Image (cartoon, coloured by chain):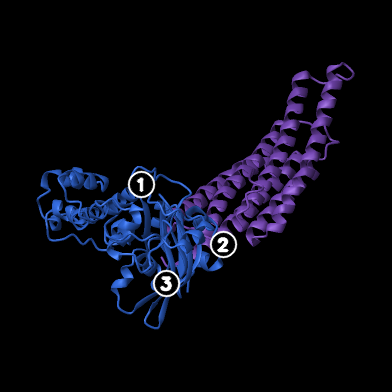
Amino acid sequence: MQYYRDLMGTDAQHEPPQSSSSDSSDTGAQTDGRMVSESDDRSRSDSIALESRNLDVYYGDDQALRSIDMQIPEGQVTALIGPSGCGKSTFLRSINRMNDLIDVARVDGDLYFQGKNVYDEDVDPVALRRKIGMVFQKPNPFPKSIRDNVAYGLRVQGKDDGDVDEKVRTALERAALLEEVEDQLDSSGLDLSGGQQQRLCIARAIAPDPEVILMDEPASALDPVATSKIEDLIEDLSKEYTVVIVTHNMQQAARISDKTAVFLTGGELVEFDDTNKIFENPEHDRVEDYITGKFG
Amino acid sequence: MSRTEFQQQLEQLRRDVYEMGTLVCQRLRQALEAFETNDDSLAADVITGDGEINERYLELEQDCVELFALQQPVAGDLRFVASSFKILTDLERIGDLAVNLGEYTRQTEYRRYSDIDIAYIGEQTIDMVERAMAAYKRSDVTSAREIAAADDDIDTLCEGASELVVRDLLEIETGVELTENTDTLLEDVSRMLLTIRDLERVGDHAVNIAARTLYMVDHDDELIY
């Protein structure tokens, strides 16, 4: 039950609601309430990392997402694509409750992370975000040293014990940045190039060893070389983490993702399938029209 | 380039590939006529005309490569360009087979197998290619499937014709009939068998075109493998 304790804060002792477990068993979601242990093999599998059911999101009177049902597989890259305003970023932010930070945002429906509805009242959003990290469109390193940028995530989690340096180096290595910054860990993170800053932010996100990494257009502000490094990194990360990425670049989605979800105007999830299926033979004419540029 | 222009380019490619198909069928028809009438001059025209087909093939292949590189087509557009790319190869090969017929014509001084109706078999295969290209042009999967089925008839015709040649050869070998120079005889037999085989291959290429059309329209690879 350590996972639920983590999710609900260190003092929480609640059991997961029985209804959540029984409901999700019908859909293949992990239901036994156990935490995926650190040693579990998170390589590609048929397990479900995240599952939304009938998820609606409103901003005031405007409905941004409509009855989203989706099962996001564990240890794979899932891309969310669609035109501006279709709700893909809203869905991404719903996963780790970033929408809680928007006053007018309201969420109906369920979103399960390893069998637990993250919108249950007893879930601590901050604890949730340690398990589901996020990388944003624009690199946003803190005005601190490279070391402190990565260590920040550990400190927030209370893991800044004796081996912080080792964990910082491990995170930088996983983010494919260590080799480039090894001799300048005390230099400001702001002195790095845009692509390096983004990889620093990825290192910061993975330092607390999350289960899921959410990425909101992580390469849209980068040049092709830096983009290529980020794409290679995403592929590597998917060997250890579940990655969910929003991108406007459909070729990027085609290159890096295993699954693709196509949202269209009105906050509707129109198609969710294997990426090669979406880009070779989508089921829906609206999806075909969108990805071939005939949309609108 | 706007997506509208891209769509116009795709339609232009469809027209260009179809026109190449028309050109190839013309060449094949000329080759058959040359073969039937023993017209060396017409056969020579078919052989030299292959340069035009090859040139057209390389141009259109380049158009496809540029569409892949610059437009990165997906879904139906991807299947269309990929199918066109493959169909171009089939058309170029049919052009080569027409050249073969022209060469057989020029090498042959007389016809031993006048009872084998090469003209009929040839017309059937040309008809298959023309129907396959029409199916491609119209994205007509029903016709595409019918063409695949028609290939069985071509195969049967070709098998029958080959059997006639082999049977004749066996009769000669057993001494029942041996009235010609043996080398000339063997060359004639070989050329006739090659002619039959080449026409059968034209039918196969027509089926390939139909198969790619089926994949292009319905993402159905049933006829490809």
Q: Earlier in the sequence, mark 2 or mark 1?
A: 1
Q: Which residue is mark 2?
A: A283
| Separation of residues labelled 1 and 3 (CA atoms) | 35 Å
**Residue situated in front as seen by the camera: A62 or A42:** A42
Place of residue B99 in the rendered image (x, y in percent of width and height, measured from the top left): 64, 40
Judge whether A164 appears above or below B6 on screen: above
Q: What amino acid type is highlighted by mark number 3?
A: Cys
**Residue situated in front as seen by the camera: B138 or B57:** B138
Answer whether residue B112 is visible to the viewer in this image. Answer: no
Answer whether residue A79 is visible to the viewer in this image. Answer: yes
Figure quadrant of residue B31: top right
Residues packed near mark 2 inside 10 Å, few (<14), some (14 to 19) or many (20 plus): some
The letter of the blue chain is: A
Q: Which residue is mark 3?
A: A86
Judge whether A254 appears above or below A41 on screen: below
Mark 3 vs mark 2: same chain?
yes
